[in-house]
Every structure is written in C-alpha cells, then in structure tokens.
Image: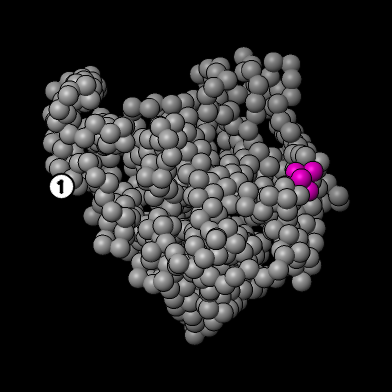
C-alpha cells in the first residue's frame, strides 16, 4: 500500500514537472533527487518543507495559478517518505487521531471540492486555469489533501525519534519566517523605504497569491511568529541565540509594516497563549538569577515611555541616543563587581532585543501616518466588513447550499450576483481558433469605475532601454480603449510607468497595432533591488473584451517578451491589480467555511481545530515541550481569521493543517521519552 502511494505521488510530481512552463528538465530531476533524499534522510523534510514554503511559488513568472512549485516539493516528499515507510516495522503508538475526526473533515472537504467542480460546469484540466474554473476547487483542496497525505510519515517520525522531529520542524518554520521577513525588508527598501511609514504601501513578501489581494502574509506571520520566540528560548550557544535575536527583530518589523490590525491582534493573542502555557505551574521553572517577570515588565514599560518621549523630541536620532544610553548602562552593569541585576548573557541579550522591539513599535506609530489612518478607519471598516459577510452568506440558496456549501473556491463566481457594484474587474483566459492560441482579456461586466484596475502582465528583466515600442494583434467587437504600460512594480503597487492609451476599433478580424510607450523614463534597477519591470495590458471600458496575440516589446535592439504568441498557453502572463479585491475574499474564516462547505463542513472544521487545541492546552500533550508553541501558532492564525479569508491560500493553509495534525499527534512526555530510549 505504501509503495503504491509513493509511486502515485512520484508519477504525479513528474507529470507536473515535465510540464513546467520554464524549467521542465530541472524540475523533473529535482523531484526524483528530492524523493531520494527524503528516503535516505527521512526527517529532513520536516525542516525543508516549512523553510522553503514561502519561496516555492513563481506565479508571476510561470502564469500557474492552481498549480505551484510547492506542489512538486510536497509530492516528492510524499514519494520518498512512503517508500521508506514500506520497509519499516510499525512504530510505537503515541498520539492518535480519532478516525472519526479524519473521516469527517476529509469527507466535508471532498464533498465541497466535488460541489465546486460541478458548480463550475464539470471537470476540465487547464494548466492556466483561473479563479472561476473548476480547478480552483482543487487549488483550495490541496492544502488539506497534502497535509493528510503527509500525516502518516510525520506521525511515524514523531513516534520513533523523540524530540528531534519537533526541533527540526520548529527550526524549519523559523527559517521560513526569516526568509519572509527578509523579503519584506527587501521589498520595502526598494519601494516606500524602510522608515517611510506614511506611504500607503502594504508589503506582500514572497506570497504571489496576493496578486488578487488577500491575507497570505498576515496568516503566515501569525502562524510563524511564535517560532521566533521558540528560537530565542531554545537557542543553544551564543551564535544560535544571536541569529534568533536577529530573527525576532526583523520578523517584528515585518509584522508591524503589514499595517494589519488583524495581525496585530493575532500576535498579541499568540504570544499571550504562549506565555500562559509556558508559565503555568506545569511549565518550566524560572532560571535562578534572572530578573523577575514583574521587574522586566516594569522596565519594558519605562523604556517604552522614554522611547516615545525621545522620538517625539528628536525623531530617530532621539530613539538611537536612548538605545545607546541603555546599552552603555548595561555595559557598565556587566563590569561592576556588584551588578544592579543579573549579568548573564541571556538576560542582557534579552533586554537588548526587548529595547529594539519597543523602538520599532514607537517608530511605526510615530514615524508616519498610515498606521493612524488604519486605526482611524476601524469603525467604518468594520461596518463594511459586516455588510460584506452578509452578502457572502446571501449566496447560499436552499437547503443543500446551507448544509454542504457552494463548493470550494466558488465565491468569486457567486458574490457579484449579490452586489453588482463589486463585480470582478477583469478576466483573463486562453482561447484557440484553428490551432492558433491567443489571450482574451475582459474588463468588468458593467461597473465603469473598475475598468482598468486589473490587467494582464509579464515581468521582463535586463538593462532598461531608452525607447520601447509595443506591437500586437488585437480584435474587438466594440470600440475599446486599451491601456499599454511598462511599470516599476513588485506585485500590486506600481511606481513609475511608461504607457499609452490606444483605441481599438471594432472589427471582425485581427488588426495590427504598434505604439510607442511614453512618459517619464524608467530608472535603472540595481541588482540588489526588489523592483521588477512589468509590461501589461488593461481594458478601460466596462463590458468590453479584446483578443490579443503576437505581442512584442522592442527596446534597445532586443525583444523583451516571452510567449508573445501564446503558443504555450498563458505561460509567463498573469492577472493582477492594485487596490480592489473584494469579490475574491470574504474576509472571515467562519463565513468562508460556511460558504464553501456549509454547516456540516463548518462543524467538522471547528471540531477538528478545537480538539487539537484542547489536547495541546489541557489534554495529554499539554506537558510536551512543543505544545505551547503549536497552540500559540494556531491561536494566532485563528485570530487573523476573524478578519481574513485563510483557506484560499494553499501554502499557508497547508502549514496550518500540518500544525493541527501535530496537535493531535504530539505524544505525552512520558510516552515520548520511553519511545526515544
């Protein structure tokens, strides 16, 4: 049985790999090699999968929406893990998931997936399927499906190897958090600037799923932030601790500069849960000589007040002077024969990290106006969210919808029928006539205010030219203004642009259009910058659709675009917008589950998560060293889910489900020790 599962996963991984739009040979070789690595070193995937999770999706380069490179990683991991399991004797039983829980949750998701496929008109396979197609249901289902497939290998590792698998998994999540935090720093340094907290810019990091908005970054940071605390608390040696301290500081910056009120709440909730579970009587005993918790709290509050005063007095200089003065006092204390407080390096380092975190908070609050605007709009924003949830629930029609849901991923298709003002602003599809492929780009069906807010684009790379000329074949059945641009861009925010608006005349056949892009010249992009140059089309008239083919962009004596003739489908092309994402996300986890899976699916999900949380906080796993961190991560994710959709982000939802399964599987310490010995 295990070898059959391994063979199916390997075959599926190779099938996806050889059809990769950019590097099929490299992907296929990587799938085979990684499966062999996992078979030889079975626990390595517990680090590699969460560490690589944030960076294993290249949507803006491939055009894949329902599929991703992360799927290749998971399939290869499953292939290697199950092939290994086939040759091993059964492991001692530790934590056990009731079969009823697995069956109920999996059945609810399968039914919702099938209903979504049926609602989309039946199953059709398309490498470049979008959010209105049947494959969108599969896109959402694969997060739970992959976690279920990897549950037996993960359980086996935890049963055989004691604490080692947990440390490996936690280190992997911490490494992924570091990658995401550095990506946010890289992005912000290239656009608004690291200390510009007034520009209305919200980072997306490496989560390209946010080309249609969403809370991928918020959800991930809520899940992963407790593992920055784990890295600090469990670091062995000063070098490891210094790396963990750096992670704490940069991840705090990433959280603060999302300007997400939901994430702020989630971080507070997760850290409160972590502190409660670790400091209760059953938790670890405080090390002798350390500062008492109440004293630490008082010092932190005093420093926060001083930092606020210093920042208002002299901005960043004042805050820097305060930090220097505090460091000088700590240095003096370390050299005193009778120090004022414990001079242990962990205590001293902890105080430095705390100071830096508090300075970051003060800087974001006082260094710009965007955060204050966000909180000032809170009441109005909440009323809008309630109306949004109500319209989403109104898509449920009849008993079957209420019990079983509309189907996974069907919200973008049904929501515009409840609110014509918030219809989809654009649609991009591949079409073919007589063997010739082309792209069909549509504007909003009726809302003229949404026209031009979304477009199809392709990233280009290389030194900039002084002059660009775009040429393309186009067909339209009504006079349609078309915007052609070349912009500095990361994902959903444009900076400087060249462009031209051209009117496509109605005609039954294809017509060739050639335009020169004009405007303020683009500046060269340094090699270290996160800025990208994106060529794009957008339809500027509601109710209009254009067919586009044989696209070229010539500048500096070279052709910049790939797959301009669409011979590879929509490879390299993707749809993105800037500030309008309402029809794609219902912005509440409970409402999202209700719409997608109905009352039955919602109940199954609540029982599944509540059971894991109960086992971690009050059940047999509560004394396990991993329990506080896993419970804190789940609590933070659920807190973000109060104001965000989270199941429509497969990579992040996969990590959530993996930690939920871990909550059910973690052994009690006694069982763990006996199996390890």
Tell me: residue 256, above or below residue 515.
below
Residue 319 lies in quadrant: top left
Q: Which residue is mark 1?
A: 294
Where is residue 475? Give x, y as percent.
71, 43
The percent position of residue 285, horizontal first and vertical second, equals 28, 54
Q: Is 31 inside the magenta-drawn segment? A: yes
- Across and down, in percent, residue 580 comes to 45, 48
The image quadrant that residue 354 belongs to is top left
Predominant secondary structure, magenta span? helix
Q: Secondary structure at mark 1?
A: helix
| Image: magenta residue range | 29-34
In-front residue for pair 153/187: 153
Looking at the image, residue 543 lies above or below residue 258: below
Tell me if 309 is positioned left or right of 410 in this view: left
Asked whether, in this view, residue 130 is left or right of residue 493, the answer is: right
Q: Is residue 599 left or right of residue 153?
A: left
> In this rendering, does residue 392 appear at all?
no
């Amino acid at each position: 049985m295990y070898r059959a599962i391994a063979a199916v996963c390997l075959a599926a991984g190779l099938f996806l790999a050889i059809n990769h739009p950019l590097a099929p040979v490299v992907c296929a070789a990587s799938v085979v090699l990684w499966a062999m690595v996992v078979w030889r070193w079975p626990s390595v995937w517990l680090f590699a999968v969460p560490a690589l999770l944030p960076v294993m999706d290249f949507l803006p380069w491939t055009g894949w929406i329902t599929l991703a490179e992360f799927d290749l990683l998971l399939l290869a991991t499953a292939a290697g893990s199950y092939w290994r399991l086939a040759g091993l004797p059964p492991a001692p039983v530790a934590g056990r998931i009731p079969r009823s829980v697995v069956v109920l949750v999996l059945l609810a998701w399968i039914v919702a997936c099938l209903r979504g496929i049926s609602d989309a008109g039946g199953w059709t396979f398309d490498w470049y399927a979008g959010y209105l197609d049947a494959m969108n249901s599969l896109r959402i289902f694969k997060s739970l499906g992959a976690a279920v497939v990897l549950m037996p290998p993960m359980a086996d590792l935890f049963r055989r190897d004691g604490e080692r698998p947990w440390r490996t998994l936690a280190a992997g999540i911490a490494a992924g958090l570091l990658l995401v935090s550095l990506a946010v720093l890289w992005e912000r340094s290239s656009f608004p600037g690291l200390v510009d907290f007034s520009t209305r810019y919200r980072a997306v990091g490496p989560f390209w799923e946010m080309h249609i908005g969403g809370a991928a970054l918020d959800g991930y940071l809520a899940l992963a932030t407790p593992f920055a605390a784990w890295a600090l608390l469990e670091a062995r040696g000063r070098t490891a601790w210094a790396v963990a301290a750096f992670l704490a500081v940069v991840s705090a910056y990433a959280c603060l500069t999302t300007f997400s009120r939901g994430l702020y709440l989630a971080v507070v909730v997760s850290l409160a849960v972590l502190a409660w579970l670790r400091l209760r009587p059953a938790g670890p005993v405080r090390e002798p000589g350390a500062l008492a918790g109440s004293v630490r709290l008082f010092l932190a509050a005093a420093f926060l007040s001083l930092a606020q005063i210093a920042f208002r007095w002299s901005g960043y200089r004042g805050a820097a002077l305060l930090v220097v003065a505090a460091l000088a006092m700590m240095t003096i204390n370390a050299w005193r024969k009778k120090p004022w407080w414990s001079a242990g390096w962990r205590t001293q380092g902890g105080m430095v990290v705390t100071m830096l975190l508090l300075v970051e908070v003060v800087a974001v609050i006082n260094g710009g106006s965007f955060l204050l605007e966000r909180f000032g709009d809170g009441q109005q924003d909440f009323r809008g969210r309630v109306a949004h949830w109500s319209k989403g629930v109104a898509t449920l029609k009849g008993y079957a919808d209420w019990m079983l849901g509309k189907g996974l991923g069907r919200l973008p298709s049904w929501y515009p029928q409840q609110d014509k003002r918030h219809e989809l602003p654009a649609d991009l599809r591949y079409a073919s006539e007589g063997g010739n492929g082309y792209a069909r780009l549509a504007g909003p069906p009726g809302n003229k205010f949404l026209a031009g807010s979304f477009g199809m684009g392709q990233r280009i790379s290389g030194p900039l030219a002084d002059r660009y000329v775009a040429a393309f074949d186009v067909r339209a059945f009504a006079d349609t203004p078309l915007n052609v641009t070349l912009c500095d861009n990361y994902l959903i925010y444009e900076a400087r642009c060249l462009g031209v608006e051209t009117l496509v005349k109605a005609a039954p056949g294809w017509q060739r259009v050639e335009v020169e892009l004009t405007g303020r010249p683009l500046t060269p992009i340094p090699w270290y910058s996160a800025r990208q140059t994106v060529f794009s089309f957008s339809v500027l008239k509601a109710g209009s659709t254009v067919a586009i083919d044989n696209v070229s962009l010539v500048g500096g004596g070279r052709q910049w675009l790939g797959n301009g003739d669409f011979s590879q489908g929509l490879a390299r092309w993707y749809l993105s917008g800037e500030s309008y994402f309402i029809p794609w996300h219902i912005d509440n986890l409970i409402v999202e589950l209700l719409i997608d899976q109905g009352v039955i699916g919602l109940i199954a999900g609540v029982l599944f998560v509540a059971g894991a949380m109960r086992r971690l906080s009050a059940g047999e796993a509560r004394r396990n060293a991993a329990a506080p961190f896993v419970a804190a991560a789940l609590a933070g994710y659920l807190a973000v889910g109060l104001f965000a959709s989270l199941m429509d982000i497969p990579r992040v939802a996969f990590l959530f489900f993996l930690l939920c399964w871990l909550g059910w599987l973690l052994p009690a310490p006694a069982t763990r020790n006996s199996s390890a010995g």
